[in-house]
Protein backbone atom coordinates (compact mmCIF):
# COMPACT_ATOMS: atom_id res chain seq x y z
CA UNK A 1 0.00 0.00 0.00
CA UNK A 2 2.65 2.53 1.04
CA UNK A 3 4.92 1.57 -1.83
CA UNK A 4 2.06 1.83 -4.28
CA UNK A 5 1.18 5.30 -3.01
CA UNK A 6 4.81 6.32 -3.30
CA UNK A 7 5.02 5.22 -6.93
CA UNK A 8 1.74 6.91 -7.81
CA UNK A 9 2.94 10.03 -5.98
CA UNK A 10 6.24 10.14 -7.82
CA UNK A 11 4.51 9.57 -11.16
CA UNK A 12 2.03 12.39 -10.60
CA UNK A 13 4.83 14.54 -9.21
CA UNK A 14 6.75 14.00 -12.44
CA UNK A 15 3.75 15.24 -14.41
CA UNK A 16 3.58 18.35 -12.22
CA UNK A 17 7.31 18.70 -12.77
CA UNK A 18 6.79 18.89 -16.54
CA UNK A 19 4.20 21.62 -15.98
CA UNK A 20 6.31 23.62 -13.57
CA UNK A 21 9.36 23.20 -15.84
CA UNK A 22 7.31 24.59 -18.71
CA UNK A 23 6.35 27.57 -16.59
CA UNK A 24 9.85 28.14 -15.20
CA UNK A 25 11.45 28.10 -18.66
CA UNK A 26 9.12 30.92 -19.70
CA UNK A 27 9.52 32.81 -16.43
CA UNK A 28 13.26 32.78 -16.94
CA UNK A 29 13.12 33.65 -20.63
CA UNK A 30 10.48 36.37 -20.67
CA UNK A 31 9.62 36.93 -17.02
CA UNK A 32 5.95 36.09 -17.49
CA UNK A 33 3.81 33.52 -15.70
CA UNK A 34 2.01 31.63 -18.43
CA UNK A 35 -1.47 30.89 -17.11
CA UNK A 36 -2.36 29.08 -20.32
CA UNK A 37 0.22 26.37 -19.66
CA UNK A 38 -2.54 24.07 -18.36
CA UNK A 39 -4.40 24.46 -21.65
CA UNK A 40 -1.26 23.57 -23.57
CA UNK A 41 -1.06 20.47 -21.36
CA UNK A 42 -4.64 19.57 -22.19
CA UNK A 43 -4.04 20.29 -25.85
CA UNK A 44 -1.26 17.70 -25.78
CA UNK A 45 -3.78 15.06 -24.79
CA UNK A 46 -6.18 16.06 -27.58
CA UNK A 47 -3.50 16.32 -30.27
CA UNK A 48 -2.08 12.88 -29.44
CA UNK A 49 -5.62 11.44 -29.25
CA UNK A 50 -6.42 12.89 -32.64
CA UNK A 51 -3.22 11.57 -34.24
CA UNK A 52 -3.64 8.11 -32.70
CA UNK A 53 -7.35 7.46 -33.19
CA UNK A 54 -8.61 9.92 -35.81
CA UNK A 55 -5.57 9.89 -38.09
CA UNK A 56 -4.51 6.38 -37.08
CA UNK A 57 -0.78 6.79 -36.70
CA UNK A 58 1.44 4.22 -35.02
CA UNK A 59 3.13 5.33 -31.80
CA UNK A 60 6.64 5.77 -33.24
CA UNK A 61 5.32 8.18 -35.85
CA UNK A 62 2.74 9.85 -33.64
CA UNK A 63 5.19 11.05 -30.96
CA UNK A 64 7.56 13.06 -33.18
CA UNK A 65 4.70 14.54 -35.19
CA UNK A 66 2.82 15.50 -32.00
CA UNK A 67 5.98 17.13 -30.63
CA UNK A 68 6.40 19.14 -33.83
CA UNK A 69 2.73 20.22 -33.84
CA UNK A 70 2.86 21.23 -30.17
CA UNK A 71 6.16 23.06 -30.69
CA UNK A 72 4.69 25.00 -33.60
CA UNK A 73 1.59 25.75 -31.57
CA UNK A 74 3.84 27.14 -28.84
CA UNK A 75 5.54 29.39 -31.40
CA UNK A 76 2.15 30.53 -32.71
CA UNK A 77 1.08 31.15 -29.12
CA UNK A 78 4.18 33.28 -28.56
CA UNK A 79 3.60 35.40 -31.68
CA UNK A 80 -0.06 35.98 -30.89
CA UNK A 81 -0.13 36.23 -27.09
CA UNK A 82 3.29 37.49 -26.06
CA UNK A 83 4.97 39.25 -28.97
CA UNK A 84 2.50 42.07 -29.68
CA UNK A 85 2.43 43.00 -25.97
CA UNK A 86 6.07 42.56 -25.04
CA UNK A 87 6.78 46.29 -24.84
CA UNK A 88 3.75 47.03 -22.72
CA UNK A 89 4.59 49.08 -19.66
CA UNK A 90 1.98 47.38 -17.50
CA UNK A 91 3.37 44.06 -16.37
CA UNK A 92 -0.01 42.37 -15.98
CA UNK A 93 -0.88 42.82 -19.67
CA UNK A 94 0.66 39.56 -20.81
CA UNK A 95 -0.77 37.62 -17.87
CA UNK A 96 -4.23 38.82 -18.85
CA UNK A 97 -3.68 37.90 -22.48
CA UNK A 98 -2.52 34.44 -21.29
CA UNK A 99 -5.74 34.06 -19.30
CA UNK A 100 -7.69 35.04 -22.37
CA UNK A 101 -5.76 32.56 -24.46
CA UNK A 102 -6.56 29.80 -21.98
CA UNK A 103 -10.32 30.27 -22.52
CA UNK A 104 -9.85 30.46 -26.28
CA UNK A 105 -7.90 27.19 -26.37
CA UNK A 106 -10.43 25.43 -24.10
CA UNK A 107 -13.39 26.55 -26.18
CA UNK A 108 -11.63 25.76 -29.44
CA UNK A 109 -10.95 22.24 -28.22
CA UNK A 110 -14.63 21.84 -27.31
CA UNK A 111 -15.65 23.06 -30.76
CA UNK A 112 -13.35 20.57 -32.48
CA UNK A 113 -13.61 17.50 -30.24
CA UNK A 114 -16.88 18.09 -28.41
CA UNK A 115 -17.79 18.30 -24.76
CA UNK A 116 -17.58 14.63 -23.84
CA UNK A 117 -14.41 13.15 -22.39
CA UNK A 118 -12.61 10.82 -24.78
CA UNK A 119 -11.05 7.51 -23.83
CA UNK A 120 -7.37 6.99 -24.54
CA UNK A 121 -6.29 3.37 -24.14
CA UNK A 122 -3.10 2.90 -22.11
CA UNK A 123 0.10 2.00 -23.94
CA UNK A 124 0.41 -1.25 -22.02
CA UNK A 125 -2.87 -2.61 -20.77
CA UNK A 126 -3.29 -4.22 -17.38
CA UNK A 127 -1.53 -3.93 -14.09
CA UNK A 128 1.72 -4.93 -12.50
CA UNK A 129 2.02 -6.42 -9.02
CA UNK A 130 4.32 -4.41 -6.78
CA UNK A 131 4.58 -5.19 -3.08
CA UNK A 132 1.38 -7.14 -3.05
CA UNK A 133 -0.79 -4.52 -4.78
CA UNK A 134 -1.76 -3.89 -8.34
CA UNK A 135 -0.57 -0.80 -10.16
CA UNK A 136 -1.31 0.38 -13.69
CA UNK A 137 1.64 0.12 -16.04
CA UNK A 138 0.92 3.69 -17.12
CA UNK A 139 2.37 5.07 -13.87
CA UNK A 140 5.69 3.40 -14.60
CA UNK A 141 5.60 4.68 -18.18
CA UNK A 142 4.96 8.18 -16.84
CA UNK A 143 7.99 8.00 -14.56
CA UNK A 144 10.25 6.68 -17.33
CA UNK A 145 9.15 9.19 -19.97
CA UNK A 146 9.29 12.13 -17.55
CA UNK A 147 12.80 11.27 -16.42
CA UNK A 148 13.81 11.13 -20.08
CA UNK A 149 12.18 14.49 -20.82
CA UNK A 150 13.74 16.21 -17.82
CA UNK A 151 17.11 14.73 -18.77
CA UNK A 152 16.74 16.00 -22.35
CA UNK A 153 15.82 19.50 -21.15
CA UNK A 154 18.81 19.46 -18.81
CA UNK A 155 21.08 18.38 -21.67
CA UNK A 156 19.72 21.06 -23.97
CA UNK A 157 20.22 23.93 -21.55
CA UNK A 158 23.42 22.87 -19.82
CA UNK A 159 25.38 20.86 -22.35
CA UNK A 160 24.43 22.28 -25.73
CA UNK A 161 25.71 25.56 -27.11
CA UNK A 162 22.28 26.62 -28.35
CA UNK A 163 20.78 25.95 -24.92
CA UNK A 164 23.38 28.11 -23.24
CA UNK A 165 22.64 30.86 -25.75
CA UNK A 166 18.98 30.60 -24.73
CA UNK A 167 20.00 30.79 -21.08
CA UNK A 168 22.14 33.84 -21.78
CA UNK A 169 19.30 35.56 -23.62
CA UNK A 170 17.01 34.75 -20.69
CA UNK A 171 19.46 36.27 -18.22
CA UNK A 172 20.25 39.41 -20.17
CA UNK A 173 18.36 39.97 -23.39
CA UNK A 174 20.03 43.31 -24.10
CA UNK A 175 23.61 42.04 -23.83
CA UNK A 176 22.71 38.93 -25.84
CA UNK A 177 21.20 41.15 -28.53
CA UNK A 178 24.42 43.14 -28.80
CA UNK A 179 26.35 39.91 -29.37
CA UNK A 180 24.00 39.05 -32.24
CA UNK A 181 21.49 36.75 -30.53
CA UNK A 182 18.01 37.17 -31.94
CA UNK A 183 15.53 37.60 -29.11
CA UNK A 184 12.70 36.60 -31.45
CA UNK A 185 14.29 33.22 -32.11
CA UNK A 186 15.25 32.37 -28.53
CA UNK A 187 11.87 33.42 -27.12
CA UNK A 188 9.96 31.56 -29.85
CA UNK A 189 12.07 28.44 -29.27
CA UNK A 190 11.44 28.63 -25.52
CA UNK A 191 7.68 28.86 -26.05
CA UNK A 192 7.83 25.95 -28.47
CA UNK A 193 9.86 23.78 -26.09
CA UNK A 194 7.58 24.70 -23.19
CA UNK A 195 4.44 23.78 -25.17
CA UNK A 196 5.90 20.49 -26.42
CA UNK A 197 7.10 19.57 -22.92
CA UNK A 198 3.75 20.04 -21.18
CA UNK A 199 1.92 18.61 -24.18
CA UNK A 200 3.76 15.32 -23.72
CA UNK A 201 2.62 15.50 -20.09
CA UNK A 202 -0.98 15.69 -21.32
CA UNK A 203 -0.43 12.61 -23.48
CA UNK A 204 0.98 10.71 -20.50
CA UNK A 205 -1.99 11.32 -18.18
CA UNK A 206 -4.69 10.84 -20.83
CA UNK A 207 -5.07 7.05 -20.26
CA UNK A 208 -5.55 7.61 -16.51
CA UNK A 209 -7.70 10.76 -16.45
CA UNK A 210 -9.45 10.71 -19.86
CA UNK A 211 -8.99 13.29 -22.59
CA UNK A 212 -11.01 16.28 -21.39
CA UNK A 213 -10.68 20.02 -20.97
CA UNK A 214 -10.54 19.62 -17.19
CA UNK A 215 -6.98 18.31 -17.57
CA UNK A 216 -5.83 21.94 -17.53
CA UNK A 217 -6.45 22.01 -13.75
CA UNK A 218 -3.22 20.06 -13.33
CA UNK A 219 -1.50 23.42 -13.74
CA UNK A 220 -2.36 24.41 -10.17
CA UNK A 221 -0.29 21.56 -8.77
CA UNK A 222 2.53 22.52 -11.10
CA UNK A 223 2.39 26.05 -9.69
CA UNK A 224 2.42 24.66 -6.17
CA UNK A 225 5.48 22.55 -7.00
CA UNK A 226 7.26 25.51 -8.51
CA UNK A 227 6.61 27.73 -5.48
CA UNK A 228 7.65 25.04 -2.99
CA UNK A 229 10.79 24.32 -5.00
CA UNK A 230 11.81 27.94 -5.39
CA UNK A 231 10.41 30.38 -7.94
CA UNK A 232 12.55 30.47 -11.05
CA UNK A 233 14.78 27.51 -10.27
CA UNK A 234 14.72 24.54 -12.63
CA UNK A 235 15.99 22.05 -10.09
CA UNK A 236 13.62 23.44 -7.46
CA UNK A 237 10.64 23.08 -9.77
CA UNK A 238 11.33 19.39 -10.31
CA UNK A 239 11.98 18.61 -6.64
CA UNK A 240 9.04 20.71 -5.42
CA UNK A 241 6.66 19.10 -7.91
CA UNK A 242 7.64 15.56 -6.98
CA UNK A 243 7.12 16.52 -3.35
CA UNK A 244 3.64 17.81 -4.20
CA UNK A 245 2.85 14.53 -5.97
CA UNK A 246 3.96 12.44 -3.01
CA UNK A 247 2.08 14.60 -0.49
CA UNK A 248 -1.04 14.42 -2.60
CA UNK A 249 -0.73 10.67 -2.92
CA UNK A 250 -0.24 10.00 0.80
CA UNK A 251 -3.04 12.43 1.67
CA UNK A 252 -5.36 9.63 0.59
CA UNK A 253 -4.58 7.90 3.86
CA UNK A 254 -6.25 10.77 5.73
CA UNK A 255 -8.99 11.87 3.40
CA UNK A 256 -10.06 11.43 -0.19
CA UNK A 257 -12.37 14.42 -0.43
CA UNK A 258 -9.86 16.96 0.83
CA UNK A 259 -6.79 15.63 -1.00
CA UNK A 260 -6.32 18.91 -2.87
CA UNK A 261 -6.88 20.95 0.28
CA UNK A 262 -3.97 19.17 1.96
CA UNK A 263 -1.66 19.91 -0.98
CA UNK A 264 -2.48 23.60 -0.88
CA UNK A 265 -2.27 23.67 2.90
CA UNK A 266 1.32 22.48 2.57
CA UNK A 267 1.85 25.19 -0.04
CA UNK A 268 0.59 27.83 2.37
CA UNK A 269 2.81 26.50 5.15
CA UNK A 270 5.77 26.74 2.77
CA UNK A 271 4.86 30.29 1.81
CA UNK A 272 4.82 31.24 5.48
CA UNK A 273 7.96 29.51 6.72
CA UNK A 274 10.09 29.34 3.57
CA UNK A 275 8.83 31.82 0.97
CA UNK A 276 12.03 31.50 -1.11
CA UNK A 277 11.33 27.83 -1.65
CA UNK A 278 13.69 24.89 -1.21
CA UNK A 279 16.19 26.06 -3.78
CA UNK A 280 16.98 29.67 -4.44
CA UNK A 281 16.28 30.42 -8.07
CA UNK A 282 18.71 31.97 -10.49
CA UNK A 283 16.40 34.93 -10.74
CA UNK A 284 17.18 35.96 -7.21
CA UNK A 285 20.88 35.43 -7.84
CA UNK A 286 20.68 38.10 -10.48
CA UNK A 287 19.92 40.86 -8.00
CA UNK B 1 36.17 52.47 -41.16
CA UNK B 2 33.12 53.99 -39.50
CA UNK B 3 31.51 57.22 -40.67
CA UNK B 4 28.51 58.79 -39.00
CA UNK B 5 26.68 61.71 -40.55
CA UNK B 6 23.94 63.80 -38.99
CA UNK B 7 22.93 61.11 -36.49
CA UNK B 8 19.77 61.86 -34.52
CA UNK B 9 18.21 59.78 -31.75
CA UNK B 10 14.82 60.55 -30.24
CA UNK B 11 13.13 59.04 -27.21
CA UNK B 12 9.54 60.16 -27.53
CA UNK B 13 9.60 63.95 -27.47
CA UNK B 14 13.15 64.16 -26.16
CA UNK B 15 15.93 64.49 -28.67
CA UNK B 16 18.95 62.82 -27.10
CA UNK B 17 21.29 63.16 -30.06
CA UNK B 18 20.84 66.21 -32.27
CA UNK B 19 22.80 65.50 -35.42
CA UNK B 20 26.41 64.48 -34.85
CA UNK B 21 29.19 63.61 -37.28
CA UNK B 22 31.77 61.14 -36.09
CA UNK B 23 34.53 59.27 -37.84
CA UNK B 24 36.59 56.35 -36.62
CA UNK B 25 39.72 55.66 -38.62
CA UNK B 26 41.47 52.30 -38.95
CA UNK B 27 43.64 51.40 -35.95
CA UNK B 28 42.50 54.41 -33.93
CA UNK B 29 41.07 54.77 -30.45
CA UNK B 30 38.36 57.40 -30.58
CA UNK B 31 36.70 58.76 -27.46
CA UNK B 32 33.39 60.40 -26.79
CA UNK B 33 33.43 62.32 -23.54
CA UNK B 34 30.78 64.41 -21.89
CA UNK B 35 28.60 64.60 -18.84
CA UNK B 36 25.65 62.39 -17.88
CA UNK B 37 22.79 62.44 -20.33
CA UNK B 38 24.80 64.08 -23.08
CA UNK B 39 23.78 61.36 -25.53
CA UNK B 40 27.02 59.39 -25.69
CA UNK B 41 25.47 56.01 -24.98
CA UNK B 42 22.67 56.70 -27.45
CA UNK B 43 25.27 57.15 -30.18
CA UNK B 44 26.78 53.71 -29.47
CA UNK B 45 23.32 52.14 -29.30
CA UNK B 46 22.46 53.68 -32.66
CA UNK B 47 25.60 52.20 -34.21
CA UNK B 48 24.79 48.70 -32.97
CA UNK B 49 21.20 49.04 -34.12
CA UNK B 50 19.38 48.69 -30.83
CA UNK B 51 17.81 52.14 -30.80
CA UNK B 52 15.83 53.93 -33.49
CA UNK B 53 17.68 56.73 -35.18
CA UNK B 54 17.98 58.80 -38.32
CA UNK B 55 21.07 59.80 -40.24
CA UNK B 56 23.74 57.88 -42.06
CA UNK B 57 26.01 55.27 -40.46
CA UNK B 58 28.56 53.89 -42.86
CA UNK B 59 30.79 50.97 -41.99
CA UNK B 60 33.55 50.17 -44.49
CA UNK B 61 31.43 51.76 -47.19
CA UNK B 62 28.31 49.78 -46.28
CA UNK B 63 25.27 51.71 -45.11
CA UNK B 64 24.23 50.08 -41.83
CA UNK B 65 21.82 52.79 -40.67
CA UNK B 66 18.82 50.50 -40.92
CA UNK B 67 20.55 47.14 -40.36
CA UNK B 68 19.43 44.87 -37.50
CA UNK B 69 21.58 44.37 -34.42
CA UNK B 70 22.14 40.77 -35.55
CA UNK B 71 23.52 41.82 -38.92
CA UNK B 72 25.71 44.45 -37.29
CA UNK B 73 27.14 41.91 -34.84
CA UNK B 74 27.88 39.62 -37.79
CA UNK B 75 29.83 42.42 -39.46
CA UNK B 76 32.16 42.39 -36.46
CA UNK B 77 30.99 45.48 -34.61
CA UNK B 78 31.10 44.39 -30.98
CA UNK B 79 29.46 46.56 -28.36
CA UNK B 80 30.43 46.23 -24.70
CA UNK B 81 27.47 47.81 -22.94
CA UNK B 82 27.46 50.18 -20.01
CA UNK B 83 27.49 48.46 -16.63
CA UNK B 84 29.21 45.33 -17.97
CA UNK B 85 26.07 43.19 -18.35
CA UNK B 86 27.63 39.77 -18.16
CA UNK B 87 25.37 36.69 -18.02
CA UNK B 88 25.28 36.21 -14.24
CA UNK B 89 24.15 32.57 -14.08
CA UNK B 90 26.68 31.27 -16.61
CA UNK B 91 30.33 30.52 -15.97
CA UNK B 92 33.14 32.73 -17.24
CA UNK B 93 33.92 30.20 -19.96
CA UNK B 94 30.27 29.97 -21.05
CA UNK B 95 30.02 33.75 -21.14
CA UNK B 96 33.06 33.91 -23.42
CA UNK B 97 31.73 31.12 -25.62
CA UNK B 98 28.50 32.99 -26.24
CA UNK B 99 30.58 35.86 -27.58
CA UNK B 100 31.25 33.66 -30.63
CA UNK B 101 27.60 33.43 -31.63
CA UNK B 102 27.94 36.03 -34.38
CA UNK B 103 30.35 33.92 -36.44
CA UNK B 104 29.60 30.47 -35.05
CA UNK B 105 25.82 30.44 -35.33
CA UNK B 106 23.39 28.88 -32.87
CA UNK B 107 24.39 25.30 -33.49
CA UNK B 108 28.04 26.09 -34.05
CA UNK B 109 30.66 23.47 -33.41
CA UNK B 110 33.44 25.51 -34.99
CA UNK B 111 36.70 25.73 -33.10
CA UNK B 112 37.18 28.82 -30.98
CA UNK B 113 40.47 27.84 -29.38
CA UNK B 114 42.42 30.65 -30.99
CA UNK B 115 40.04 33.35 -29.79
CA UNK B 116 39.90 31.82 -26.32
CA UNK B 117 43.69 31.69 -26.02
CA UNK B 118 43.93 35.30 -27.10
CA UNK B 119 41.37 36.44 -24.52
CA UNK B 120 43.03 34.40 -21.76
CA UNK B 121 46.44 35.80 -22.66
CA UNK B 122 44.97 39.29 -22.48
CA UNK B 123 43.15 38.67 -19.22
CA UNK B 124 44.87 35.80 -17.35
CA UNK B 125 42.51 36.38 -14.42
CA UNK B 126 39.62 35.11 -16.53
CA UNK B 127 41.39 31.80 -17.09
CA UNK B 128 41.84 31.39 -13.34
CA UNK B 129 38.14 32.00 -12.84
CA UNK B 130 37.07 29.99 -15.89
CA UNK B 131 34.57 27.80 -14.02
CA UNK B 132 33.17 30.45 -11.70
CA UNK B 133 29.70 31.90 -12.25
CA UNK B 134 29.93 35.41 -13.65
CA UNK B 135 27.95 37.09 -10.88
CA UNK B 136 30.60 36.05 -8.36
CA UNK B 137 33.33 38.07 -10.08
CA UNK B 138 34.46 41.49 -8.89
CA UNK B 139 33.47 44.59 -10.85
CA UNK B 140 36.84 44.82 -12.59
CA UNK B 141 36.77 41.14 -13.52
CA UNK B 142 33.24 41.46 -14.87
CA UNK B 143 34.40 44.34 -17.06
CA UNK B 144 37.29 42.20 -18.32
CA UNK B 145 34.80 39.40 -18.99
CA UNK B 146 32.52 41.75 -20.92
CA UNK B 147 35.46 42.94 -23.04
CA UNK B 148 36.75 39.38 -23.41
CA UNK B 149 33.33 38.23 -24.54
CA UNK B 150 33.34 40.92 -27.23
CA UNK B 151 36.84 39.86 -28.34
CA UNK B 152 35.55 36.31 -28.85
CA UNK B 153 33.28 37.64 -31.58
CA UNK B 154 36.21 38.39 -33.95
CA UNK B 155 35.64 42.14 -33.66
CA UNK B 156 36.65 44.55 -36.39
CA UNK B 157 35.40 47.51 -34.41
CA UNK B 158 34.98 47.61 -30.65
CA UNK B 159 32.46 49.89 -28.98
CA UNK B 160 33.16 50.40 -25.27
CA UNK B 161 30.58 52.09 -23.11
CA UNK B 162 32.08 53.53 -19.92
CA UNK B 163 34.53 50.75 -19.08
CA UNK B 164 35.66 52.63 -15.97
CA UNK B 165 32.20 52.90 -14.44
CA UNK B 166 32.17 52.04 -10.75
CA UNK B 167 35.73 50.70 -10.64
CA UNK B 168 38.58 51.54 -8.30
CA UNK B 169 41.32 53.85 -9.70
CA UNK B 170 43.96 51.11 -9.75
CA UNK B 171 41.63 48.77 -11.61
CA UNK B 172 40.80 51.51 -14.10
CA UNK B 173 44.49 52.04 -14.71
CA UNK B 174 45.02 48.34 -15.45
CA UNK B 175 41.94 48.16 -17.64
CA UNK B 176 42.95 51.08 -19.82
CA UNK B 177 46.40 49.58 -20.19
CA UNK B 178 44.75 46.44 -21.55
CA UNK B 179 42.52 48.44 -23.86
CA UNK B 180 45.48 50.25 -25.41
CA UNK B 181 47.38 46.97 -25.59
CA UNK B 182 44.51 45.34 -27.52
CA UNK B 183 44.47 48.27 -29.90
CA UNK B 184 48.25 48.32 -30.40
CA UNK B 185 48.63 44.57 -30.81
CA UNK B 186 45.91 43.91 -33.34
CA UNK B 187 45.15 47.37 -34.68
CA UNK B 188 41.54 46.94 -33.57
CA UNK B 189 39.81 50.31 -33.81
CA UNK B 190 37.94 51.28 -30.65
CA UNK B 191 35.16 53.79 -30.15
CA UNK B 192 34.90 54.48 -26.45
CA UNK B 193 32.46 56.44 -24.35
CA UNK B 194 33.91 57.73 -21.09
CA UNK B 195 33.14 60.05 -18.23
CA UNK B 196 36.63 59.74 -16.89
CA UNK B 197 37.88 62.46 -19.24
CA UNK B 198 41.50 62.45 -18.08
CA UNK B 199 41.86 58.71 -18.66
CA UNK B 200 40.02 58.86 -21.96
CA UNK B 201 42.15 61.67 -23.35
CA UNK B 202 45.38 60.02 -22.30
CA UNK B 203 44.72 56.73 -24.10
CA UNK B 204 42.83 57.88 -27.20
CA UNK B 205 44.00 59.30 -30.51
CA UNK B 206 41.01 61.48 -31.24
CA UNK B 207 38.27 62.83 -29.00
CA UNK B 208 34.81 64.28 -29.45
CA UNK B 209 33.26 66.23 -26.60
CA UNK B 210 29.49 65.82 -26.52
CA UNK B 211 27.26 68.32 -24.81
CA UNK B 212 23.47 68.06 -24.85
CA UNK B 213 23.38 65.83 -27.87
CA UNK B 214 25.81 67.85 -29.94
CA UNK B 215 29.53 67.87 -30.54
CA UNK B 216 30.87 70.95 -28.80
CA UNK B 217 34.51 70.29 -29.53
CA UNK B 218 36.71 67.76 -31.28
CA UNK B 219 40.34 67.22 -31.99
CA UNK B 220 43.42 65.09 -31.45
CA UNK B 221 43.43 63.96 -27.82
CA UNK B 222 46.98 65.16 -27.34
CA UNK B 223 45.85 68.68 -28.21
CA UNK B 224 42.62 68.63 -26.24
CA UNK B 225 44.34 67.52 -23.08
CA UNK B 226 46.13 70.86 -22.96
CA UNK B 227 43.17 72.95 -24.03
CA UNK B 228 42.13 75.44 -21.37
CA UNK B 229 38.41 75.07 -21.99
CA UNK B 230 38.57 71.29 -21.66
CA UNK B 231 40.61 71.64 -18.54
CA UNK B 232 38.13 74.01 -16.99
CA UNK B 233 35.10 71.97 -17.89
CA UNK B 234 36.26 68.44 -17.25
CA UNK B 235 39.24 68.31 -14.96
CA UNK B 236 38.35 70.98 -12.42
CA UNK B 237 40.74 72.39 -9.90
CA UNK B 238 42.05 69.15 -8.49
CA UNK B 239 43.50 68.25 -11.85
CA UNK B 240 45.33 71.56 -12.10
CA UNK B 241 46.77 71.19 -8.64
CA UNK B 242 47.94 67.72 -9.50
CA UNK B 243 49.57 68.98 -12.67
CA UNK B 244 51.45 71.72 -10.90
CA UNK B 245 52.77 69.31 -8.33
Image (cartoon, coloured by chain):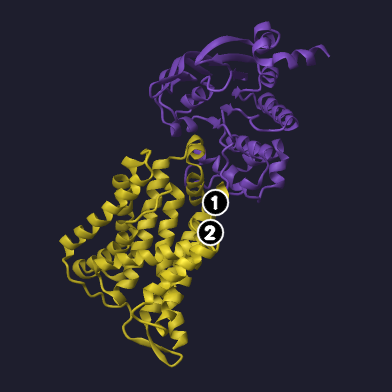
Badge 2: few (under 14), some or many (20 or more) residues near its Cα, within 10 Å?
A: some
Q: Residue at x 69, y 47 (%)?
A: B129
Taking depth in this image into account, of A125 and A249 the one nearest to the observer is A249
Quadrant position of the N terminus of chain A in the picture: bottom left
Q: Is residue A274 left or right of residue A223?
A: right
Q: Is residue A177 left or right of residue A41?
A: right
Q: CA distance from mark 2 to mark 1?
A: 9 Å
Answer above or below: position of B178 versus B115. above
- Residue A276, numbered label: 2
Residue occupying image coordinates x 65% and y 29%: B164
Instruction: Kindly state the secondary structure of the residue where label 1 is placed.
Output: helix
Q: Which residue is mark 1?
A: A284
Q: Nearer the viewer, mark 2 or mark 1?
A: 2
Q: Earlier in the sequence, mark 2 or mark 1?
A: 2
Q: Viewer-proximal residue, A154 or A250?
A: A250
Q: Position of residue A272 (x, y in %)?
A: 50, 63
- Residue B182 against residue B91 in the figure, above or below: above
Left or right, residue B145 beside residue A80: right
**Which chain hosts label 2?**
A
The percent position of residue A127, horizontal first and vertical second, equals: 35, 86
**Is residue B18 visible to the viewer in this orientation of the structure?**
yes
Chain of the residue that carries numbered disc 1 in the rendered image:
A
Amino acid sequence: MYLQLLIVGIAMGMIYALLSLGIVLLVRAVGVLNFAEGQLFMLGAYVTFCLTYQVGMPLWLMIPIAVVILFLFGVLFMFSIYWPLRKSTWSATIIISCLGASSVISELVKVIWGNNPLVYAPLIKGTVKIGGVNLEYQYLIIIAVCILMIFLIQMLFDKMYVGRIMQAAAQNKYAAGLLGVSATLTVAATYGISAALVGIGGWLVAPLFLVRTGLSDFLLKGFAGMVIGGYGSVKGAVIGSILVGIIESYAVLLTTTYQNAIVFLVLIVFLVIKPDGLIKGKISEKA
Amino acid sequence: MLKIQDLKVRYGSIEAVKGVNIEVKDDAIVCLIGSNGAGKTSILKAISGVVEHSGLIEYNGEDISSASNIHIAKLGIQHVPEGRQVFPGLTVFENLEIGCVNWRGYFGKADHKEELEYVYSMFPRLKEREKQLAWSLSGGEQQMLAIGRALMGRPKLLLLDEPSMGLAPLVIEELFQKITEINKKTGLPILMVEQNARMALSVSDYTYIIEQGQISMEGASADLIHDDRVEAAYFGKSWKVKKEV
